[in-house]
Image: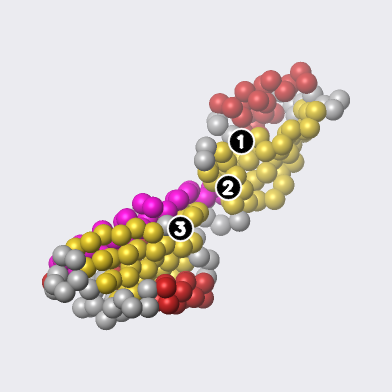
Amino acid sequence: MEAEYKTVYEGGEGEVVEKKSRFIATVLPVRTEEEALQFIEVVRKKYWDARHHCFAYVIGERGELQRCSDDGEPGGTAGKPILEVIKGEEIRNVVLVVTRYFGGTLLGTGGLVRAYSAAAKEGLASSVIITKIRGVKLHIDINYTGLGKVQYILGQRGLEVLDAVYTEKVELDALIPMDILEDVEAEITEGTNGQAIMQENEQCYFAEINGKKQIIE
């Protein structure tokens, strides 16, 4: 698992017009090449009367699988520029299709590259992009005396408490990025004089969405 990577949480649609040609970009988060290819077909059917449906997709946490297509446009003027936009934003697990309705005027090689790139950027701009962070759900048992210190440590690092149960003691579940887990555990142990009991539960990815950190599959 990567420590963190950017991906699309919610796809969007953007459009640019160049010399009466319409370039409609449609974005979707995907996990497999099969999902990407299925979505490309969905876009083809939606815009069945368009001349070109150029696309690119990047699959895998490290971007292991990358494909693109000019779909009839001059070689290197559509698919590759779309792919370069995705790679430039370092986004993973995404497919981006740019549909072109020809406006009657040839744009030339440079014009096509600029138009497809601009459309791809518009599509991503209309999408919700998140950074998925690899972490762990840390279960913390603490008495009321040490609660304030634990809350302070978590708060100073901007760490999210998912759940809290108050009985004769307090049980907290917090999302901790893997790369600072050992440091946080050491701080809590020291800050509570070893009174806190901590248990590392399942690893997961989480991201901040609408100002709140959430576990993301």
Span of residues in magenta: 109-135
The residue positioned 37% from the left and 55% from the top of the image is 124
Kindly indicate the quadrant of the structure image that contains residue 47. Answer: bottom left
Q: Residue furthest bottom?
A: 72
**Spatial separation of the CA atoms under disc 1 and disc 3:** 26 Å
Tell me if label 2 and label 1 are in contact, CB under 8 Å.
yes
Q: Position of residue 135 (x, y in %)?
A: 60, 46
Q: Are marks 1 and 3 in contact (CB under 8 Å)?
A: no
Question: Is 116 part of what is drawn in magenta?
Answer: yes
Tell me the CA gap for discs 3 and 2. 18 Å
Crowding at dot 1, Cα within 10 Å, few <14 / some 14-19 / many 20+, comes out as some
Amino acid marked by disc 3 = Gly
> Sequence-wise, which precedes: disc 2 or disc 1?
1
Q: Colour mode?
A: secondary structure
Residue 39 image point, x, y percent: 47, 72
On-image quarter of the N terminus: bottom right
- Say which residue label 3 marks: 11
Magenta stretch contains residue 200: no
**Tag 1: amino acid:** Glu
Q: Quick one: 168 or 20, which is closer to the camera? A: 20
Nearer-the-camera pick, 173 or 142: 173
Q: Which residue is mark 1?
A: 160
Q: Secondary structure at mark 3?
A: loop
Helix, strand or loop under label 1: loop
